[in-house]
Image (tube, helix red, strand yellow):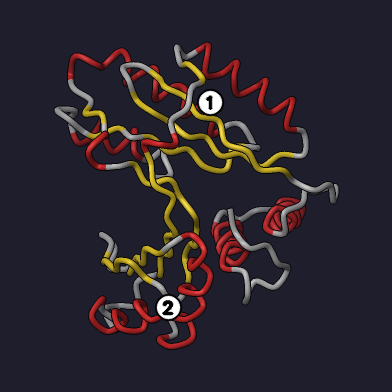
Amino acid sequence: MAVYGGDPNMNPRLAAILVNAKKAGFPKASMESAIARGQGKSATGAALENFTLEVIVPPTVAMIIETETDNKARTMMDLRHLVKVHGGTVTPTTYLFQKRGRVAFSADDGKTSVDDVLDDAIEAGAEDVEADDDGGIVVWTEPNRTTAAANALHKSHGLKVESADIIWDANEDTKVPLDGEHMDAVKGLSALLDALQDNPNVQGVYANAAQGSLTDEVWEELVGKLDA
């Protein structure tokens, strides 16, 4: 969920889409599709509809799948089938998550620290500010303050918006640790995530899984397929 608009300077989501498309070397047709999606439309100009699918998958991992589609009935049917094939069940799960705004700013060679932006971030509605592993800055906000925080720090500190999203952040006290005994379930979850990544209507996948006793290699591969 985000505020749509055709101007990348006023729409951090659209700006992030364009940056990622250019980095990936997308052809012009794909770029046009990305721009249209950033404006809430399909490549043909049809309005896109958002909906979430809530599921539980083995062992007991809660997931939220966010979609954006011009054919809700077809997309719903396709995703329900995928979930069933991989042993999952469609059931309410949003109560296990909190909706939050997350703005990621690119690293600027250490010129700007968390302390440098903290006051301005709080004034713009930030709930928390942290540094990521790459030296960038991540700002957490209420969902309706996401765009304001992105624009404020871009203007006040010249920070480049890498992404600005409204995500489902799993509640810490209800996360499900994955252990060695769950390897079959982990493989099934990984396969489901691969299938979801291949669906062009899926915009975000969130899960309340925790590393448990999984090796770093297995965990990082799994997390790399999630949006949070």
- Horizontal side of 101 relative to 32 (left or right) equals left
Closer to us: mark 2 or mark 1?
2
Q: Secondary structure at mark 1?
A: helix
Residue 43 at x, y = what percent? 79, 48
Q: Nearer the viewer, residue 106 or 139?
A: 139
Q: Give the residue drawn at x 41%, y 73%.
A: 125
Vertical arrangement, residue 115 with respect to residue 211, above or below: below
Q: Is residue 205 above or below residue 135?
A: above
Pick the residue in front: 215 or 50.
Answer: 50
Looking at the figure, which quarter contains the C terminus? top left
Q: Which mark is residue 172?
A: none
Q: Amino acid at mark 2?
A: Ala
Q: Residue furthest front?
A: 95
N-terminal label among 2 and 1:
2
**Number of numbered discs overlaid on the protein picture:** 2
Quarter residue 23 falls in: bottom right
Q: Is residue 190 above or below residue 135?
A: above
Residue 99: percent from the left, percent from the top? 44, 50
Dot 2 corresponds to which residue? Answer: 124
Q: Position of residue 156 (x, y in %)?
A: 43, 88
Q: Looking at the image, which residue is at 58% across and 31% down?
A: 198
Return the residue at label 1.
195
Of helix, strand and loop, which one carries label 2?
A: loop
Taking the spot 25% from the left edge, 79% from the top edge, the residue there is 113
- Mark 1 burial class by Cα count in 10 Å: few <14, some 14-19, many 20+: some
Q: Is residue 126 shown left or right of residue 47? A: left
| Real-space CA distance between mark 2 and mark 1, rounded to the nearest whole angstrom | 38 Å
Q: Position of residue 49 (x, y in %)?
A: 72, 43
Residue 119 or residue 134, whichever sits in front: 119
* Residue density around tag 2, few if under 14, some if 14–19, many if 20 or more, within 10 Å: some
Amino acid marked by disc 1: Ala
